[in-house]
Image (cartoon, rainbow, N blue to C red):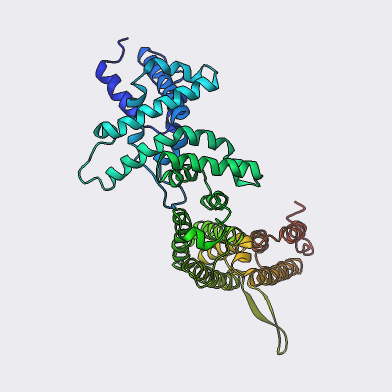
Amino acid sequence: MAGMTAAHRVALAALLERCPDATLRTVSAAIASLPGGRAAELRSMLADEVRDRKLRALVLGPILPMFRPRADGVTAMTFPGHVLPRLWKAASGREPQLLYRLDRGDEADATAVADRICVAAAAMARDQPDLIWPAHGASTGRDQGLSDLAACLDLIHLVRRGLKSLEVWLKRPDGDQIAELRLLLKDCAEVHVEGAQRVLEMLFSHLDDAVLILRIVTQTSLAAGREGFLSESELAGFIDRLIAGVDARAKRIATFRKDAELGRVESVIADLTWCAGVLGELDVTLTLNPQSVWGKAVRDGRVAIAGQLSTLLRAADKAVDQALPLERVQIAGRMTRKVPNLAMPVEGEAVTTALSLLKLVGSARGPASTFGCEGDRKTLVEALTARLIDYADETLRMINDGDAKVEAHALKLIDLAARCLDLVDAGDAARTVRRRAAVAGAPPRTGEVSSRAA
């Protein structure tokens, strides 16, 4: 069978170059057992692409995350994704005879080769910008982006060394480890005027949790824990970005409407958790003046989120009443009592609303403490737990007394109550309710056989 034509290979190479790593793995697995010459050629091309990306990661690892936007949406120094393969192809093509030394096991030699390729990449970003970053119409920020990219490549040999200590700096570094961080920033500042800022941008790109950059920023100087020092330094940008992230999420939370956007509950929980993490870290790492710009912004964000969280807690309370309501029935004369309405559906809008909001109540345990709502949340959980247990017990009594017209449906309502208990972290109560429901059932009438016995 004829193999691929040159045109096929060029087109496939261009396509593979644009594929994410996950897609490459999926395609490789899919064609692993396919017969034929063309399949063999494709497997070979895939293997070459995978190896090339492995070498690229070894060389450009310190700046690799900067070629994609941050998942949390926090502003960061980034470069277009299409620049990465162009940069690597141009830089590695300068001295292709050195590439084999990157993965032969000698770490010191591989690091030397990687640094040498990065020097070439920095030169090409300055001397051949159209090759690395083609201008497409009005490329906003292209010139500044090229300048930042070249500067990062100039510093990459220093950051490569520092990344090995990143995890240590995020925990409890000792004096020597803090000195190592400050020396890194000093060395970078000697290479570029804004070297310290850029090295922090490069470290920032490796942090999935944006707020962790505070732990590094506050170690950069003995005075870095003071707001006055940070607000006047180039490091203020990181604080501004985190506060802007809190503000953006606070606005999203404020626009949530429980009766129209239940699908957003997961994102609301994520936003609450993120904001709580950032504000908690700010409280620990910085001493903010309540009257300063940062202090006011943090206070406003905290108050706005706390107000909306309190509103959602109250809404959850009402939603349970609507999903599992009680009705008043007459027992003797004018005497009445409230009992579960066993005609209510176990699915539908009311049930979905209650389950979604209760999930928020259970997930907000940590964030509620940060926003001063934990007392209200805990009181709500205790009240809901008692109410749901009473609801289940009363429904069980009605089943056992033969007052439930459709026993199977009544048991589904009990299971719904148990699910609600699970969502508010009342697991023990939920298990108790389910165990009682497992043995519930009205005794058979004379001459009838119990369905459970059958």
Query: Closer to the camera, 400 or 127?
Result: 127
Q: Quadrant of the N terminus?
A: top left
How many marks overall?
0
Residue 389's place in the image compared with 70, above or below, is below
Residue 180 image position (x, y, % from top left): 58, 40
Q: Quadrant of residue 115?
A: top left
Can you say whether 40 is above or below 170 in the image?
above
Residue lying furthest top: 1
Please tell me in which quadrant of the rendered image residue 38 appears: top left
**What residue do we see at 75% from left, 58% from top?**
428
Q: Residue at x 47, y 35 (%)?
A: 62
In which quarter of the view is residue 2 placed?
top left
**Left or right: residue 309 compared with residue 448:** left
**Residue 380: image location, x then y, percent:** 66, 71
**Which of 263 and 351 lies nearest the eye of the viewer?**
263
77 relative position to 307: left or right: left
| For residue 324, above or below residue 412 | below
Q: Nearer the viewer, residue 27 or 216?
A: 216
Measured from the top left, where is residue 80 in percent x and y? 34, 40
Residue 66 shows in this picture: yes
For residue 198, above or below residue 280: above
In the picture as drawn, the residue positioned furthest to the bottom comes out as: 334
Residue 81, percent from left and from top: 36, 38
Q: Residue furthest left?
A: 137
- The front one of 381 and 116 is 116
- The single residue placed furthest to the front in the displayed view is 190
The answer to whether residue 30 is visible is no
